Amino acid sequence: MGLEEYLNSKPLYYDDIDYNNVNEAWAILKPHINLPYVIHIVGTNGKGSTGRFLASFLHQHSKSTLHYSSPHIIEFNERVWINGENSTNEQLDFAHTKLQNILPIDLIKKLTYFEYTTLVALVLSSDLDFIVLEAGLGGEFDATNIVQNNLTLITTIGLDHVEFLGDTIEKIASTKMRACDNQYILGYQVSKIEVNNAKENILKDRIEIPLNSSITFPKDTQNLPLYLKNNLRLALSALEFLGLSNTNLSLPKLFGRCQKYKENITIDVGHNSLAATVLLREFLAKKINLIYNSYSDKDYAAVLMILKPIIKKLYIISIDDSRIAATKDIELVCDKLNIEYCDYKTISKDEEYLVFGSFKVVEEFLQRDNG
């Protein structure tokens, strides 16, 4: 059974996770892996773009680098990026076979989808110079935290996954910061007081590397959205800390991050209030048509309230997924907010659109548009 078929047999989401399983698996696997320098990225928003910026810059410095991120938009290979390219099926199947040969079958069966794919990435990182590990929803209990990290990058922290991480910014920040093992760089924060309180409590015995607020950006960043510039600054500060130059660097293409997909269509995989706030800033001078849906556990009422000033009309895109909010519930929010809406069917070349709501929303839109 290849990796794709194997992963399809595992559920993507779990109500209860025993973190002892992935730690036990790593203890068995560790002697077989020559682990590189580990850069761990935690936070609420901006992990994917910060990681891709940094991984790309390391690769441009001829450092062999793996970037592990999640989720994917089109194909699983996007999650494991190695030296400038998405991983190949052959590389993924090699790692899968190695895991199947080393780990006990009964333990493998207990591992979650994300835990197993994290181990796949660790296998493929063996003997490289760097691995950039993007945490999933958590920090201290995240599968990516099974390895000792050399450097932790902390992106913007906001309210999300409160049922797992805590119901305040400070609690969420604390959970994420406990993943830091050694040195860290704290990126741009909206909730500065709460995040700094968590930092003072949790990271007092760790070494803080200051964020370079005046660092020189590469060329062609003038049209980059502000939130991506903040993530770029964090990545460049890490590069500077590693003793590598930021001159003559090329910006990587970021799929689904405020990306101009077509002349009149922008796609963004953001899904929470923090992401909505930064998009509001980017589109504040205009009205756009929003193609939208949301997972039911997200505060989509807050998201739509934030985006209301820029929404011309909301198009609800249907998605066949049990975790997606009921259409009638989104319609009810639109009625309360006085937002005009209808079902998404097609687009007009004479209108401007923003596709937003999650990786799943962008994936569904792209499949239909290319369909």
Image (tube, rainbow, N blue to C red):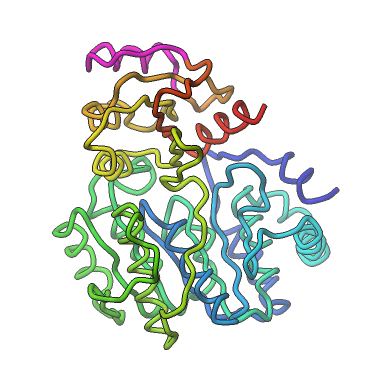
Residue 156: % across, % down = 30, 56
Q: Residue at x 33, y 52 (%)?
A: 225
Percent position of residue 144, x then y: 53, 62
Q: Residue furthest bottom?
A: 243
> Residue at 52% across / 42% down in the picture?
16
Residue at point 33%, 19% (across, down): 313
Residue at 57%, 30% in the rendered image = 364
The residue lying toward the viewer, choosing from 248 and 161, is 248
Res 79 → quadrant: bottom right
Closer to us: 183 or 70:
70
Total numbered labels: 0
Residue 258: x and y, percent? 41, 45
* Extreme residue in the left direction: 193
Q: Position of residue 359 (x, y in %)?
A: 51, 39
Looking at the figure, which quarter contains the C terminus?
Answer: top right
Of 311 and 146, which appears nearest the observer?
311
Find residue 184 and report its image quarter: bottom left
Answer above or below: position of 245 versus 310: below
Q: Is residue 197 left or right of residue 296?
A: left
Depth order, front residue of 87/369: 369
Res. 69 image quadrant: bottom right
User: Which residue is most to the front?
Assistant: 350
Magenta-drawn segment = 325-343
Against 149, residue 359 (above or below) is above
Is 329 located above or below residue 74 in the figure?
above
Q: Is 203 included in the stretch rendered in magenta? A: no
